[in-house]
Image (cartoon, helix red, strand yellow):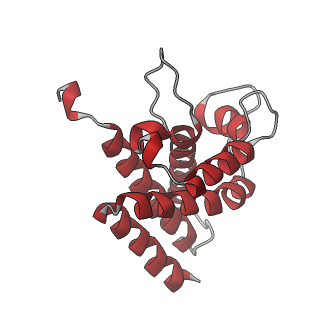
Amino acid sequence: MDISDFSPWKVFDYESYMYLYTYVFVHSFKSEAKNIEKEAIKNSYVESLMLHTRILSEILITTQQSDSDDLNIDNIIPPLKQSKHLGTLVRELRLAYGNANEVGSPRWTLNKMLAHATLLRGSYYNYDHIIELLHPLLIKIIEEIFVLTNDEKIKQYLDYYENNLTKIN
């Protein structure tokens, strides 16, 4: 695939889609792991959710740097089209996510327990506290981006999330 086929919006669209759908999958996985196959499936859903949480959070909180090819919120929505509400939500996410050197912060935890094979990592980690902290902010940000863009695919993902989460709860 030619690099010109890539765009910031396609990446954000994909990460939003995967985040919302894996969130529903994780919360619909009712069965306690009773055998190794079910445990592996459950863990793969949780790790996928955490990976997409990490990528989406990094996109949203990363500030523009001239020498960086990292995607950021300004690549998704130009600064002049961003609402004050979006700016507030992104600042709240940045604060909640923490930084890579802040032991125990979601950012540090996702780097050390999920994304890298470190001496601190075991075979399993409970990410519930990270989901509880970041999920409400990520949902609000995705909803605000829909309000600002009126993108039909984002609306479809949000509708899927809302409809299926209601069935689970």
> Against 161, is 80 above or below?
above
What residue lies at 57% left-to-right and 63% top-to-bottom? 140
Q: Quadrant of residue 137?
A: bottom right
**Left or right side of 75 for 140:** right
**Left or right side of 4 for 156:** right
Q: Quadrant of residue 119?
A: top right
> Against 19, is 122 above or below?
above
Instruction: Give the residue furthest to the front.
Output: 80
Position in image of residue 144 (x %, y %): 50, 61
Instruction: Give the residue furthest to the top.
Output: 67
Q: From the image, which quarter does the C terminus lie in?
A: bottom right
Instruction: Give the residue furthest to the right.
Output: 103
Position in image of residue 46 (x %, y %): 57, 55
The residue lying toward the viewer, choosing from 165 and 148, is: 148
> Against 100, is 33 above or below?
below
Q: From the image, which quarter does the N terminus lie in?
A: top left
Position in image of residue 122 (x %, y %): 72, 38
The residue lying toward the viewer, choosing from 79 and 18, is: 79
Q: Quadrant of residue 61?
A: top right
What residue lies at 55% left-to-right and 62% top-to-bottom? 139
Position in image of residue 108 (x %, y %): 72, 35
**Left or right side of 23 for 103:** right
What residue lies at 34% left-to-right and 44% top-to-bottom? 9
